[in-house]
Image (spheres, helix red, strand yellow):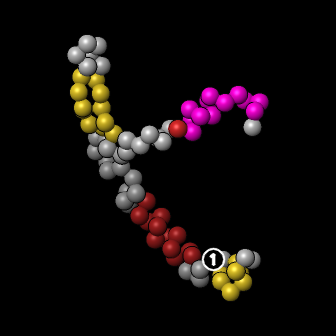
Amino acid sequence: MKDPSRPEHNFLVADAWAIFVKEIGYVQKGFLSDLPGMNMYVYQRTCARTGFIFYRSRRSSSALEGYHLHLRAAQHPCVP
């Protein structure tokens, strides 16, 4: 299949199915997911005043995690 914007290039590679099978094999073996039995949250500290326990995620501490959920919740449903 030719790429319409670049006719000299193909849109898909000839071995696309083989690449897909290889990549999905990684997912099935768990290489792209959390390790089974691994605790993804690490104890940080306990607040002395309230007793609240703080944990840190091993995945990421990105400020953008969950950003869009809160952004959409803050928008009025009738405004695009």
**Residue at left offset 24%, top offset 32%:** 43
Q: Nearer the viewer, residue 64 or 57?
A: 64
Is there any visible trace of residue 37 in the rendered image? no
Q: Is 53 rendered above or below residue 41?
A: above
Residue 79, located in which quarter of the rendered image? top right
Secondary element at tag 1: loop
Is there any visible trace of residue 21 in the rendered image? yes
What is the crowding at mark 1: few (fewer than 14 residues within 10 Å), some, or many (at least 20)? few
Q: Is 56 rendered above or below residue 26?
A: above
Drawn side of residue 64 relative to residue 50, left or right: right
Amino acid found under the numbered disc labelled 1 = Leu
Residue 75 % position (x, y): 66, 30
Drawn side of residue 20 relative to residue 4, left or right: left
Drawn side of residue 59 relative to residue 72, left or right: left
**Residue at left offset 31%, top offset 48%:** 36
Q: Nearer the viewer, residue 49 or 27?
A: 49
| Residue hosting label 1 | 12
Q: Is residue 74 magenta?
A: yes
Residue 25 % position (x, y): 44, 65
- Specify the farthest residue to the right: 78
**Residue at left offset 26%, top offset 16%:** 51
Q: Is residue 36 magenta?
A: no
**Residue at left offset 63%, top offset 34%:** 72
Range of residues picked out in magenta? 68-79
